[in-house]
């Protein structure tokens, strides 16, 4: 079984369309929405759709904005508890093309990957409608992470990912510390340190058209200093092996 986790905060403009796009794929995917108390009624839209998709669509509601990382950790634990074999991270705003779920799944199911990453930078810079400053910041952030952590991943901050369940069962989710942008880096680095096979799949990332971006300078700051902390802590941590 395949589960797509979609964290939401004020995504009423996008949530119904992204769910329907996933359910219209030629392979069957289930969707778990982790909503952080969206005041715009995002959760109510999802709960209304559950009447139409009672088996495929699920929601976990949380009180307040608790961070992207904690949303995904909650989703991972839910997915493991419900015996999903492949668990995906995906944004609600169509910056990740739902059709690319098929490519991420194929990389794990048929090409030997334990984690597949929807990569913006594995074949050039494939980002549409971002300001040039943000493109450069993101691109060089990944270069910086790759250099400091010594990992051969071109898009270390990507948020479009497929995991085999055994990865999430192995990497000790309760030891994942970062909540924002750096969460994506920590998950990839921990997966790498545990000895799993990681494959990057080229995608085209398109900036959201509806709703408001959650990105901020503080998130980049967490990533910049978090990478150094992550490297230092790795010297003293014994990572479980697959």
Image (cartoon, grey):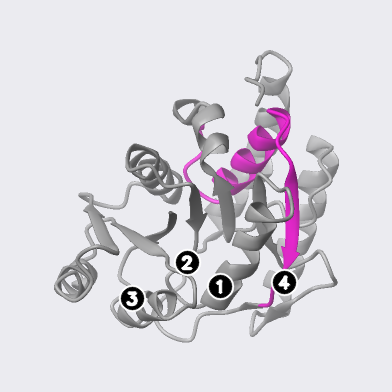
Q: Quadrant of residue 145?
A: top right
Disc with the residue nearer the chain's start (3 vs 2):
3
Q: Which mark is residue 96?
A: 1
Q: Give the class, few, some or many, for how many residues have Cα within 10 Å of label 1's Cα (few <14, many ≥20).
A: many
Q: Is residue 174 magenta?
A: no
Quadrant location of the C terminus?
top right
Image depth: mark 4 or mark 1 in front: 1
- Reading the image, the residue beneath label 4 is 135
For the record, the magenta segment spans 176-204
Q: Establish if 238 lies above or below 13.
A: above
Q: Establish if 223 lies above or below 59.
A: above
Quadrant location of the N terminus?
bottom left
- Reading the image, the residue beneath label 3 is 15
Q: Give the class, few, some or many, for how many residues have Cα within 10 Å of label 2's Cα (few <14, many ≥20).
A: some
Of the pair 168 and 68, the residue shown nearer to us:
168
Image depth: mark 3 or mark 4 in front: 3
């Amino acid at each position: 079984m395949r589960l797509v986790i979609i964290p939401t905060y004020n995504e009423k403009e996008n949530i119904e369309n992204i769910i329907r796009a996933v359910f219209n794929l030629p392979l069957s995917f289930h969707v778990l929405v982790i909503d952080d108390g969206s005041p715009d009624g995002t959760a109510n839209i999802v709960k209304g759709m559950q009447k139409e998709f009672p088996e495929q669509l699920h929601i976990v509601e949380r009180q307040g904005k608790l961070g992207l990382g904690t949303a995904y950790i909650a989703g991972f634990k839910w997915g493991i508890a419900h015996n999903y074999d492949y668990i995906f991270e995906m944004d609600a705003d169509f910056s990740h093309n739902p059709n690319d779920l098929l490519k991420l799944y194929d990389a794990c199911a048929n090409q030997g990957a334990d984690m597949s990453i929807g990569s913006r930078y594995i074949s050039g810079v494939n980002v549409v409608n971002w300001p040039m400053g943000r493109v450069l910041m993101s691109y060089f952030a990944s270069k910086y992470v790759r250099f400091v952590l010594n990992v051969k991943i071109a898009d270390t901050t990507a948020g479009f990912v497929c995991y085999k369940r055994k990865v999430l069962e192995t990497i000790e989710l309760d030891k994942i510390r970062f909540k924002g942008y750096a969460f994506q880096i920590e998950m990839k680095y921990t997966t790498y340190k545990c000895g799993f096979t990681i494959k990057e799949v080229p995608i085209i990332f398109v900036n959201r058209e509806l709703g408001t971006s959650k990105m901020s300078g503080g998130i980049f700051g967490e990533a910049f200093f978090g990478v150094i902390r992550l490297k230092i802590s790795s010297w003293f941590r014994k990572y479980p092996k697959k």
